[in-house]
Image (tube, grey):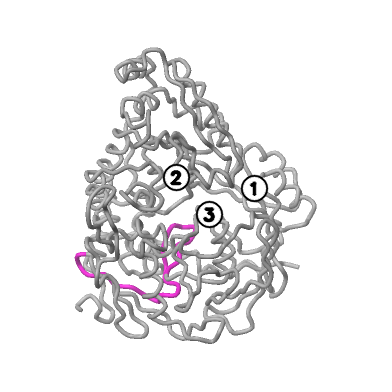
């Protein structure tokens, strides 16, 4: 194929460069788009007059040795394809790896794939795999591993959220409840031992980024279904002890690592619970070197611990108070719109995050996302909310319940309490059904009204494909709108920055119009680490990229 010719430069790259030079595309979007099209990160950074931050010289010579200890919940981690929590993937990503890697700068670079090329129409993608990479059992990493994983992800019986993310490789037969998804025949093919080709149903720019979504870790082609029992990977560490709710102990494997020197002897994860205070207490008492996260209420405590640095990052992490659109009373769009009209989004950011977050617009695309289009903010209108409720038959008010589990902190309950207060003037009584986090995750997809935490993705289109396409595993709203999916497909295919934002405006307006969620705020993220831990960076998705971290003993 023409696009697979050696040293080929995608024709759209010159257009992207011109968009940047003319001011139509900002630096962040240029770096992201040009690298997705196959330009190296170093070359992309040189265009904007900067050095690639991943190859900057370190201030001191790295020292080898030592165990990095981290306080973080330790959950079951059997099958990476079905992971629904970052914490699982943070342990697993030290063992198994990804075709690509997206850094803290939101730029996607080669990883197990050493390069990729796309056809002019972005419907055919060819990935050249890195040679000389060994599995811990001595097998060579090759195209069979990649084909095995993609085929498995796109099998509905596996239950992987990747079937939504890679919707361009999936065919749907039937409609409504009878709809069945399956991988499109020929969607993935092995070209040779170190080349894999993807054949898409429609153009998608974000394919390389999709391969660093946390359920896309590449497992061995003979994977039996439980990584915690068979920790065979290509990464620098293996699992030596694992107890859910207690600890995960990783040690460096003896064989040479394909990506050069690894400085840590091991990584120990200890579960002190999800609460910020418990994690920070472990930090303060020197039981651990760092923690996973803490909330804004614990900022003062974190600032008081000497010898530690606070790492913070702006993110697209959020909480979605979503409606199950097929269950009463939320099957009536007038009820859903009435609830949204009671919401004053500014108040959530002020009261919960002290203004450190971003204000949401009820469509799950964040200001940090490169394709985000800023809509006119929905204004609170209690009288219109009352009118819609009366029209829907609730002249005497409405009583509803929201399920929540504070799955990543008590800020979720604070958000729900603010909503409760804002709904009251319209005659809506909101009850909070607070339950243990583990209980919430048993019912998060079926609750008529629930508060679900969603992690950061580098693109809004990624999270929308995961969460709101019809019939995908993580569609907790039961939303089914072909108009939305067609608009999302169109946005995913556009390279021109201004045109993509315009396309995303349509996507965002549809979601806001259909009122399937209350999503008023975006969450900032913070963690604490000992100053002796070097080359550590905050990632907006809270991914632990520890392969070049070292400890100054």
Quickly name the residue at label 1: 274
Residue at 45% across, 46% down:
316
Quadrant hosting residue 209: bottom left
Q: Nearer the viewer, residue 337 or 488?
A: 337
Residue 31 visible in the displayed image: no
* Position in image of residue 422 (x %, y %): 48, 21
Quickly name the residue at label 2: 445
Mark 2 and mark 1: span between their CA atoms?
A: 22 Å
Residue 335 visible in the displayed image: yes
Mark 2 and mark 3: span between their CA atoms?
A: 15 Å
What's the magenta region? 100-121
Direction from residue 178 to residue 520 in the image, left or right: right
Between disc 2 and disc 3, whose residue precedes? 3
Q: Nearer the viewer, residue 114 or 415?
A: 415
Residue at 34% across, 57% down:
30
**Residue 183 in magenta stretch:** no
The secondary structure type at the circle numbered 3 is: loop
* Position in image of residue 217 (x %, y %): 47, 67
Res. 489 mark:
none
- Looking at the rendered image, the disc whose residue lies closer to the viewer, 2 or 3, is 2
Q: Is residue 539 above or below residue 6?
A: above
Mark 3 and mark 1: span between their CA atoms?
A: 12 Å
Direction from residue 117 to residue 241 in the image, left or right: right
* Position in image of residue 234 (x %, y %): 52, 77
Quickly name the residue at label 3: 85
Between disc 3 and disc 1, whose residue precedes? 3
């Amino acid at each position: 194929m023409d696009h697979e010719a050696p040293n080929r430069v995608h024709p759209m790259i010159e257009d992207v460069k011109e968009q940047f030079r003319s001011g139509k595309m900002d630096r962040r979007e240029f770096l992201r788009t040009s690298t997705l099209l196959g330009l190296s990160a170093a070359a992309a950074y040189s265009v904007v007059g900067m050095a690639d931050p991943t190859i900057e010289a370190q201030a001191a010579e790295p020292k080898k040795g030592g165990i990095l200890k981290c306080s973080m919940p330790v959950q079951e981690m059997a099958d990476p394809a079905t992971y629904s929590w970052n914490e699982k993937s943070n342990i697993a990503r030290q063992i198994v790896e990804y075709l690509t890697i997206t850094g803290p700068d939101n730029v996607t670079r080669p990883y197990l794939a050493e390069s990729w090329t796309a056809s002019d129409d972005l419907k055919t993608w060819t990935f050249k795999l890195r040679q000389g990479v060994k599995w811990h059992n001595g097998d060579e990493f090759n195209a069979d591993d990649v084909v095995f994983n993609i085929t498995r992800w796109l099998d509905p019986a596996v239950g992987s959220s990747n079937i939504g993310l890679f919707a361009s490789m999936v065919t749907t037969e039937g409609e409504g409840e009878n709809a069945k998804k399956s991988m499109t025949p020929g969607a993935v093919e092995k070209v040779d031992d170190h080349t894999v080709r993807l054949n898409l149903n429609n153009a998608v720019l974000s394919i390389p980024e999709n391969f660093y979504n946390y359920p896309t870790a590449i497992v061995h082609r003979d994977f039996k279904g439980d990584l915690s029992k068979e920790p065979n990977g290509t990464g620098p560490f293996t699992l030596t002890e694992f107890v859910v709710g207690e600890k995960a102990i990783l040690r460096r494997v003896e064989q040479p690592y394909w990506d050069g020197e690894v400085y840590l002897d091991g990584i120990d994860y200890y579960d002190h619970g999800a609460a910020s205070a418990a994690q920070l207490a472990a930090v303060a008492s020197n039981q651990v070197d760092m923690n996973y996260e803490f909330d804004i209420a614990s900022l003062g405590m974190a600032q008081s611990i000497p010898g530690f640095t606070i790492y913070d990052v702006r993110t697209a992490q959020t909480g979605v108070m979503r409606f199950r659109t097929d269950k009463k009373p939320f099957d009536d769009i007038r009820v859903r719109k009435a609830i949204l009209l009671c919401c004053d989004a500014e108040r959530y950011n002020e009261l919960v995050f002290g203004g450190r977050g971003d204000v949401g617009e009820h469509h799950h695309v964040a200001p940090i996302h490169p394709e985000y289009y800023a809509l006119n903010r929905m204004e609170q209108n209690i009288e219109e909310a009352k009118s819609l409720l009366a029209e829907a038959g609730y002249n005497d008010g409405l009583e509803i319940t929201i399920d929540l589990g504070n799955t990543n902190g008590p800020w979720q309950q604070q958000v729900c309490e603010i909503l409760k207060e804002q709904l009251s003037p319209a005659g809506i009584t909101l009850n909070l059904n607070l339950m243990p986090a583990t209980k919430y995750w048993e019912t998060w997809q079926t609750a008529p009204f629930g508060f679900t935490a969603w992690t950061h993705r580098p693109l809004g289109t990624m999270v929308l494909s995961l969460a709101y396409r019809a019939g995908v595993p993580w569609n907790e709203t039961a939303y089914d709108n072909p108009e939305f999916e067609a608009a999302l497909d169109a946005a995913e295919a556009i390279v021109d920055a201004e045109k993509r934002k315009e396309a995303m405006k349509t996507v965002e307006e549809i979601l806001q119009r259909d009122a399937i969620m209350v999503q008023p705020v975006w969450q900032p993220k913070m963690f604490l680490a000992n100053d002796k831990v070097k080359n550590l960076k905050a990632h907006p998705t809270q991914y632990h990229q520890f392969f070049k971290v070292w400890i100054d003993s």
